[in-house]
Amino acid sequence: GPQGVTPRVSYPYALPNGRGVLFVRCARVCDSVSLHLIELPSLRTRELQPAAGRAWYLPTGHLAYRPSGSSGLVGVPFDLARLAVTGQPVPLLDHVAMTHSGSWGDAVFDIARNGTAIYLPGEAIGLRTIVRHQPDGRETPLTADHRQFLFPRISPDGRYLPTEVPSLAR
């Protein structure tokens, strides 16, 4: 990066084969982000996708991520054995809520090993409900509560959905 500026690194995601870790690199004052990979055990680092935020590996052999400046998620074919993107991005979900606006925001999304996705619909974080998106396209709300749900994660056994709910008290 520019002299005297240390880029931020965040959102590490270990790939299921144990051969790499995805992460987001933020340049300057986080006015641009890109998706990178650390290869293991060599620790070689390289950029996978420019203008891309936090990513997840999907059981279909794709990476899902939010393109910078977008409110949706895209999927790009990814060869896990070669640790390489092998095609062009295609839209997956529109209007996924973000934790922040601009290029640095994180999509409020997670995916289980069976391909079931959960996400918060919307553009910006506000009071929302959590939605379950099945691989066949069906969507169902998981709660009637409307809160500022953040960072939903599906437990490894698929039985629990921990989330963060900020306190309204100041």
Image (tube, rainbow, N blue to C red):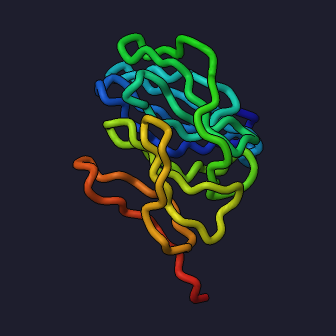
Instruction: Pick the quarter of the image with the C terminus.
Output: bottom right
Position in image of residue 161 (x %, y %)? 35, 59
Position in image of residue 105 (x %, y %)? 65, 51
Whether residue 29 is visible here, answered yes or no, is yes
Position in image of residue 119 (x %, y %)? 52, 52
The total number of labels drawn is 0
Between 169 and 148, the residue placed more toward the observer is: 148
Q: What residue is rendered at 47% in x and 24% in y? A: 62
6 w.r.t. 63: above or below? below
Instruction: Pick the quarter of the image with the N terminus.
Output: top right
Between 117 and 103, the residue placed more toward the observer is: 117
Q: What residue is rendered at 43% in x and 42% in y? A: 134
Q: In this view, does 158 lie to the left or right of 163?
A: left
Q: What residue is rendered at 70% in x and 45% in y? A: 71
Q: Is residue 106 left or right of residue 45?
A: right
Between 68 and 33, the residue placed more toward the observer is: 68
Residue furthest to the bottom in view is 169
Q: In which quarter of the image is residue 68?
A: top right
Residue furthest to the left in view is 157
Q: What residue is rendered at 73% in x and 55% in y? A: 101
34 w.r.t. 107: above or below? above
Q: Is residue 75 left or right of residue 118?
A: right
Whether residue 25 is visible here, answered yes or no, is no
51 w.r.t. 170: above or below? above
141 w.r.t. 82: above or below? below
Q: In which quarter of the image is residue 66?
A: top right
